[in-house]
Image (tube, rainbow, N blue to C red):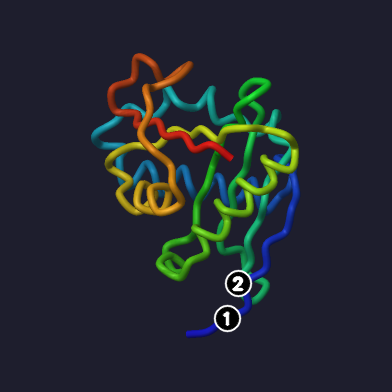
Amino acid sequence: MDFHVTYIKTDGKDKDFIENCRLLDIELDRRVGKKIQRDKYTKYNQLDEIREAVAVYADNRLAGGGAIRRYDDKNMELKRVFVHPQYQGRGIGTRLVSMLMEWAAQLGYQRMILETGELLAESCAVYKKLGFQVTENYGPYRDMPESLCMAKDL
């Protein structure tokens, strides 16, 4: 099935971006909620500090989204990336993450960091394909063994 994909830059207050994050949380609860206590991550996934986000549409229907958030002067953190299951496997996530990396570089950041989990094999595959490498867990994820942190120079 072919469809037209549009990537729209927005921020953490965008209703479609917020809806995509809600759907992401439902999917994470379904996939890893029985193995990982997810509520400890809630405070690290607040949207109020997100100034750079992208909502993805396939034939004008919300298909996914993601964001970047300043971590420090050098690092931009990739946040809340999710492509709806019916649109996965079509390159949308790869293009979305590439676009967010380009945006971070344009803003002057030198490195992109992210937190994911080994249970999210599809996400890990996209990140590795784009050149991210596993790194030591950073910041709030330092003492969370189920977290997998990755980084890539921009």
* Count of numbered circles on the image: 2
| Residue 117 image point, x, y percent | 34, 37
SS of the residue at dot 1?
Answer: loop
Residue under the image location 57 percent in, 51 percent down = 20
Residue 101 lies, with reference to residue 139, above or below; the image says below
Front residue of this view, candidates 97 and 151: 151
Q: Amino acid at mark 1?
A: Phe
Residue linked to disc 1: 3
Quadrant position of the C terminus in the picture = top right
Q: Which mark is residue 31?
A: none
SS of the residue at dot 2?
Answer: strand
26 displayed left or right of 47: left
| Residue 110 image point, x, y percent | 62, 32
Question: Which of the 4 image quadrants contains residue 39?
Answer: top left
| Residue 74 image point, x, y percent | 64, 25
Cα separation, mark 2 vs mark 1, equals 6 Å
Residue under the image location 54 percent in, 45 percent down = 22
Residue 131 lies, with reference to residue 5, above or below; the image says above
Q: Circles 2 and 1: CB distance less than 8 Å?
A: yes
| Residue 79 image point, x, y percent | 55, 38
Residue under the image location 51 percent in, 32 percent down = 113
Q: Residues within 10 Å of mark 2 (few under 14, many from 20)?
A: some
Residue 104 lies, with reference to residue 43, above or below; the image says below
Q: Which mark is residue 58?
A: 2
33 displayed left or right of 87: left
Q: Residues within 10 Å of mark 1 (few under 14, many from 20)?
A: few
Residue under the image location 64 percent in, 20 percent down = 72
Q: Amino acid at mark 2?
A: Ala
